[in-house]
């Protein structure tokens, strides 16, 4: 009886830790945020991508772990390869993928960013603490070139959110979708992006994604003129790089991949280990590498890019098969 009571107590503590880690400590309106924010603006080098590229507005920009960087490689004094994210060299990695469904043809404009780490904090427990963390933003456009859906997810497959636009057909929404607001693991996001009021894509008006400090969670999406952002925040011009560059990082007189290329971690980001997620979640999610960041690429190059912790839903929630992934989450594009 005593053992059963203790087991229940331990289970309750674990649940509280996980919920605490997934829920932000503070819920601030973007208008109340401190001026210490960096705005990463894409440099127009790939016109198709720059047209839909969001501006990333990040809290507490002065902290290096809150700065968008470029994956890099070096050889240590012990002659080992070391992969890290160089916060002094920002970059947004891009890729375009097309897909078809029963209702039409679509294209995904994919934007990938990386940070040095989600830090270990002496004052706050972050479940996702670890190095070389990243995020994907996917802008889905229809065959008329109009954006109908924005999907955000961390490169571990967690913190998935869907942000439909007012140009998405009514029949495509999940049943009972709240168009006013949604709560995503503690963050309050809009249920609909109104493109009747906001012309997008537009050379002047830009989509702004506000990311929370430390955890890099998406906490707000809104539209603003680029000039207004330049006047209010620190502006960082950020080049757009082909996604393929992540597989050929310069290393001395050669190159190396940002991702493991062999063994059981094939396709996972080198140096991306999540000790707390492994300790608290791997045993019930049946995945020893739960929470570890990975490549968004074909099956033969990596493990599943699943977005549901239900082990029986790994295939259906795998984001690489985008039509199937959308269907699993209730979308009928």
Image (spheres, rainbow, N blue to C red):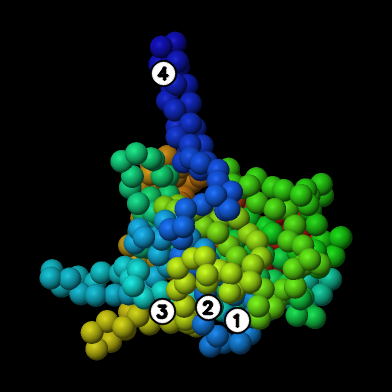
Mark 1 vs mark 2: in front: 2
Question: Of the residues under marks 1 and 4, which one precedes in the sequence?
Answer: 4
Q: Are marks 4 and 2 in contact (CB under 8 Å)?
A: no
Question: Of the residues under marks 3 and 1, which one precedes in the sequence?
Answer: 1
Residue 254, x across and y down, in percent: 28, 87
Instruction: Note whether residue 140 is visible.
Output: yes
Residue 61 sits in quarter: bottom left
**For mark 3, does the 10 Å Cα neighbourhood hold few (<14), some (14 to 19), or many (20 or more) residues?**
some
Q: Residue at x 69, y 59 (%)?
A: 163
Residue 123, x across and y down, in percent: 34, 39
Disc 3 to disc 2, how far (Cα)?
A: 21 Å
Question: Of the residues under marks 4 and 2, which one precedes in the sequence?
Answer: 4
Residue indicated by mark 2: 42
Q: Are marks 1 and 2 in contact (CB under 8 Å)?
A: yes
Q: Nearer the viewer, residue 188 or 95?
A: 188
Label of residue 6 in the image:
4
Disc 1 to disc 2, how far (Cα)?
A: 9 Å
Q: Residue at x 35, y 58 (%)?
A: 63
């Amino acid at each position: 009886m005593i053992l059963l009571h203790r087991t229940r107590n331990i289970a309750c503590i674990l649940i509280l830790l996980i919920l605490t880690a997934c829920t932000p400590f503070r819920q601030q309106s973007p208008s109340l945020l401190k001026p210490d924010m960096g705005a990463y603006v894409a440099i127009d080098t790939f016109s198709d991508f720059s047209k839909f590229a969001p501006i990333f507005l990040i809290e507490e920009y002065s902290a290096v772990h809150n700065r968008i960087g470029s994956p890099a490689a070096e050889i240590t004094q012990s002659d080992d390869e070391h992969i890290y994210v160089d916060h002094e060299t920002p970059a947004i990695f891009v890729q375009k993928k097309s897909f078809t469904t029963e209702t039409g043809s679509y294209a995904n404009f994919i934007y990938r960013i990386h940070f040095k780490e989600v830090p270990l904090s002496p004052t706050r427990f972050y479940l996702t603490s670890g190095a070389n963390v990243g995020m994907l933003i996917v802008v889905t456009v229809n065959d008329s070139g109009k954006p109908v859906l924005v999907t955000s997810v961390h490169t571990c497959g967690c913190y998935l959110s869907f942000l439909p636009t007012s140009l998405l057909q009514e029949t495509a929404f999940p049943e009972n979708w709240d168009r006013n607001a949604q709560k995503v693991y503690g963050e309050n996001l809009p249920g609909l992006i109104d493109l009747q009021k906001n012309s997008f894509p537009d050379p002047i008006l830009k989509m702004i994604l506000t990311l929370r400090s430390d955890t890099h969670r998406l906490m707000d999406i809104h539209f603003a003129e680029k000039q207004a952002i330049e006047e209010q925040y620190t502006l960082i011009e950020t080049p757009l790089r082909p996604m393929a560059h992540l597989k050929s990082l310069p290393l001395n007189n050669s190159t190396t991949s940002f991702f493991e290329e062999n063994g059981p971690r094939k396709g996972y980001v080198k140096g991306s280990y999540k000790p707390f997620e492994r300790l608290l979640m791997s045993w019930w999610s049946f995945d020893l590498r739960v929470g570890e960041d990975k490549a968004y690429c074909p099956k033969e190059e990596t493990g599943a890019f699943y977005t549901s912790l239900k082990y029986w839903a790994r295939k259906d929630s795998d984001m690489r098969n985008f039509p199937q992934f959308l269907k699993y989450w209730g979308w009928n594009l």
